């Protein structure tokens, strides 16, 4: 029976095709054995429906050609960590689909292609990322999806580059294309991208090595290492303080290897990039860097002393 393969969800058409009469369907609904999810779609059990059943109900309500997409597809592939309402479903633009409570319908001129061998049907990783970038409120949020997807190894920069190129209309094309290139260099978050673009490059700092893997008692990754100069830069995003012990362990591991650690947060990189560059430059110069930082522009706040430190 279809319900066994659809997390306990079935459509009226499927139930009738399986041998139930309209009277039997109504009796099961009236007794509470079944629940109505939406018009013509039923939960074949009582009680609160689990998340997977909710997703199946939304998909079946949208009918043929529908796929889960955007944040809902991201949830299924592990791009986001917890469900975000509403359920997002993409349907071919030529189909008329009645609105369903709790479901956000996206009509697409290009027929959405479901990821192969995935149930319930959803967009593939690359299409999901592209969809999310186009629904983002600003370029930073859009670029963040690119960095996160590659950082979690759900796709590759090469595949995303091809997915972006395949879209005729694409907001922030230049920014997204540049982001793919920087992700290839090892930037796995918006903060890491910001550090590269606003701190390191425009101030003439040497190119750091990103996502350096270290194996001690546990595997750790350094955000940026200036290996010849014994300096590590760690970039603390929004989730940085969820496990302060993890930060301490990384810093201790760096100290054991004779590395000094600078730790920057969002405000340091976004609002004070010049001052942050100066701090990095001072330590690099003390460790033997022969060059000097450069001003990023006429309004650069790079302290004068750091230029010749």
Image: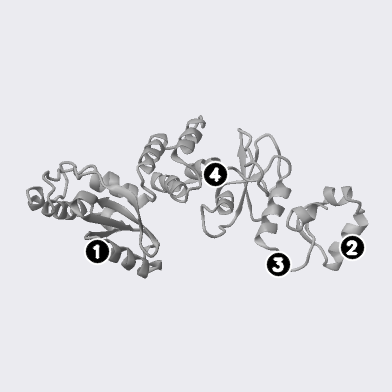
- SS at circle 2: helix
- SS at circle 4: helix
**Residue 116 x, y percent position in the rendering:** 64, 41
Closer to the camera in the image, 54 or 285: 285
Image disc number at residue 125 = 4
**Residue 17 x, y percent position in the rendering:** 88, 47
Q: Are marks 1 and 4 in contact (CB under 8 Å)?
A: no
Earlier residue among tags 4 and 2: 2
- SS at circle 3: loop
Give the vertical position of 245 relative to 271 (above or below): below
Residue visible at 58% across and 49% down in the picture: 73
- Label 2: few (<14), some or many (≥20) within 10 Å? few
The residue indicated by pointer 3 is 48
Closer to the camera in the image, 64 or 30: 64
The residue indicated by pointer 1 is 255
Q: CA distance from mark 4 to mark 2?
A: 42 Å
Image disc number at residue 11 = none
Image disc number at residue 27 = 2
Between circles 1 and 3, the one closer to the viewer is 1
Q: Are marks 1 and 2 in contact (CB under 8 Å)?
A: no
Earlier residue among tags 1 and 3: 3
Closer to the camera in the image, 169 or 149: 149
Between circles 4 and 2, the one closer to the viewer is 4
Q: CA distance from mark 3 to mark 4?
A: 30 Å
Between circles 3 and 4, the one closer to the viewer is 4
- SS at circle 1: helix
Q: CA distance from mark 1 to mark 2?
A: 70 Å
């Amino acid at each position: 029976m279809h319900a066994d393969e659809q997390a306990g969800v079935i459509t009226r058409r499927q139930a009738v095709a399986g041998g139930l009469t309209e009277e039997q369907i109504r009796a099961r609904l009236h007794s509470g054995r079944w629940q109505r999810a939406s018009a013509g779609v039923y939960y074949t059990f009582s009680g609160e429906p689990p998340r997977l059943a909710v997703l199946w109900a939304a998909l079946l309500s949208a009918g043929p050609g529908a796929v889960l997409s955007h944040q809902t597809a991201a949830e299924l592939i592990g791009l986001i960590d917890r469900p975000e309402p509403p359920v997002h479903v993409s349907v071919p633009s030529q189909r008329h689909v009645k609105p369903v409570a709790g479901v956000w319908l996206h009509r697409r001129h290009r027929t959405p292609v479901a990821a192969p061998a995935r149930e319930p049907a959803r967009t593939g990783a690359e299409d999901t990322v592209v969809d999310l970038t186009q629904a983002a409120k600003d370029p930073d949020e859009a670029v963040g999806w690119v960095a996160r997807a590659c950082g979690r190894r759900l796709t590759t920069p090469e595949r995303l580059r091809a997915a972006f190129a395949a879209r005729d209309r694409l907001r922030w094309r230049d920014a997204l294309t540049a982001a793919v290139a920087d992700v290839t260099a090892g930037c796995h978050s918006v903060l890491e991208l910001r550090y590269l673009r606003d701190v390191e490059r425009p101030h003439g700092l040497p190119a750091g090595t990103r996502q350096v893997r270290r194996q001690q008692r546990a595997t750790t990754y350094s955000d940026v290492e200036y290996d010849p100069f014994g300096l590590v830069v760690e970039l603390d995003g929004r989730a940085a303080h969820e496990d302060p012990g993890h930060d301490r362990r990384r810093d201790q591991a760096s100290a054991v290897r004779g590395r000094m650690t600078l730790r920057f947060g969002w405000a340091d990189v976004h609002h004070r990039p010049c001052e942050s560059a100066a701090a990095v430059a001072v330590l690099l110069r003390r460790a033997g860097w022969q060059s000097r930082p450069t001003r990023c522009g006429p309004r650069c706040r790079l302290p004068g002393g750091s230029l010749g430190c």
